[in-house]
Every structure is written in C-alpha cells, then in structure tokens.
Image: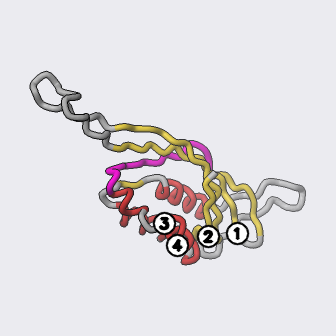
Amino acid sequence: MAAAADGDDGGVPTADPDELALVERFAGAVTTFDSGRVEADIERILALGTPAFADEFRSTMGATFVADLQASGSVSSGEIVAGPTLQRVDDGTSVFFVVVNQQITAPSAAPAEGEGTDGSGQGAQPAPQSRVVRVGLLVQVDPDRDLVTSVQVL
C-alpha cells in the first residue's frame, strides 16, 4: 500500500504500516550480521529488496566483502534508535529516514609472544573489542511491491 499525503495544505504524509514494518526489518537486517553466517545474512537483506536493489547492493559490497567479513570473525547487531520516519513520497516511492545503533564485536588480536600471560604460564585470552556506530539510513520503498528499491547510508 502507498503512503498518503494529508491533502494540499503542506501536511506531512502519513506512512503506511506495511512500509514502516518493511523499513524496520530492513534497517535491522542491514546492520545485523555474523561472520559465521554472512551469506545467509546477505540473502535476508536481498529478500527485502527489488532485483535492481539486489544488483546494486552486491556491486557495492565488492568482490572480497564476504571473505573479509568471514576472516574478521565479527558479529554485529543493529537497534533502531529513531524512526523510521516518512520523509517524502515522490513519483510512487516512499522515502524513510531511520537511525540505527550498530554494535560491532570483533575478536582481539592474540597477544604477542611473551605478552599477556595470566600468571600460570598460559597466554591470557584476548578480550573481544566492541564499538557502537550510529548509522543513518535513507530507505526508498516501492509501495506497490513493498520492497526496498535503494538505500543511502548517511
């Protein structure tokens, strides 16, 4: 279903609940991954978009994205902290703004030889490194198909 404008009085368009749900699922999917199942995570993202979006997404990832992510051992989870908010409806597409906190956890590098011993002669296990990145997304939706047509990371 399409978002509807609130008349010609300059009112804010009203977001369709199905589109809001799609954008929420997409924002979570695109910021949540596990290096051990990255290919399934990518398929989950692509399933929410049009074929043209899938082609663009794969092109943007680059040739080594999957291998690099698998080698990193990283895990990420996304949590929406603002939105999604309908920004505009143009030529049959709806554009939403959403902000996600993405927590990325990666294993630390092993300590150098002779460093990090725990007093028992054994090397201490390195603690995982974690950081939170705030990501702003503009997500364009085809309301007739309820699929993502493009995303812009801000």
Q: Is residue 84 left or right of residue 32?
A: right
Q: Amino acid at mark 4?
A: Ala
Horizontal side of residue 24 vs 4, given as left or right: left
The residue pinned by badge 3 equals 62
Categorize mark 4 by other alpha carbons within 10 Å: few (<14), some (14-19), many (20+).
many
Q: Nearer the viewer, mark 2 or mark 1?
A: 2
In this view, the residue in front, 2 or 106, is: 106
- Frontmost of labels 2 and 3 is 3
Could you say which quadrant of the image residue 49 lies in?
A: bottom right
Percent position of residue 42, x then y: 43, 65
Point out the tag, 1 or 3, that comes first from the N-terminus.
3
Q: Secondary structure at mark 3?
A: loop
Q: Give the residue at mark 1.
A: 93
Q: Work out whether 107 lies above or below 67.
A: above
Q: Which residue is mark 4?
A: 54
Residue 149: numbered disc: 2
**Magenta-colored stretch includes residue 83:** yes
Distance from label 1 to label 3 (Cα)?
27 Å
Q: Are marks 2 and 1 in contact (CB under 8 Å)?
A: yes
Q: CA distance from mark 2 to mark 1?
A: 9 Å
The residues bearing labels 1 and 4 have C-alpha atoms spaced at a distance of 17 Å
For the residues marked 2 and 3, what is the alpha-carbon distance in whole angstroms?
19 Å
Q: Which residues are magenta?
A: 71-84
- Badge 2: how crowded within 10 Å, few (<14), some, or many (20+)? many
Label whose residue precedes the other's in the sequence (3 or 4): 4
| Relative image position of residue 30 (x, y in whole percent) | 49, 57
Residue positioned most to the right: 9
* Precedes in sequence: disc 2 or disc 1: 1
Q: Between residues 22 and 38, which one lies in front from this camera angle?
A: 38
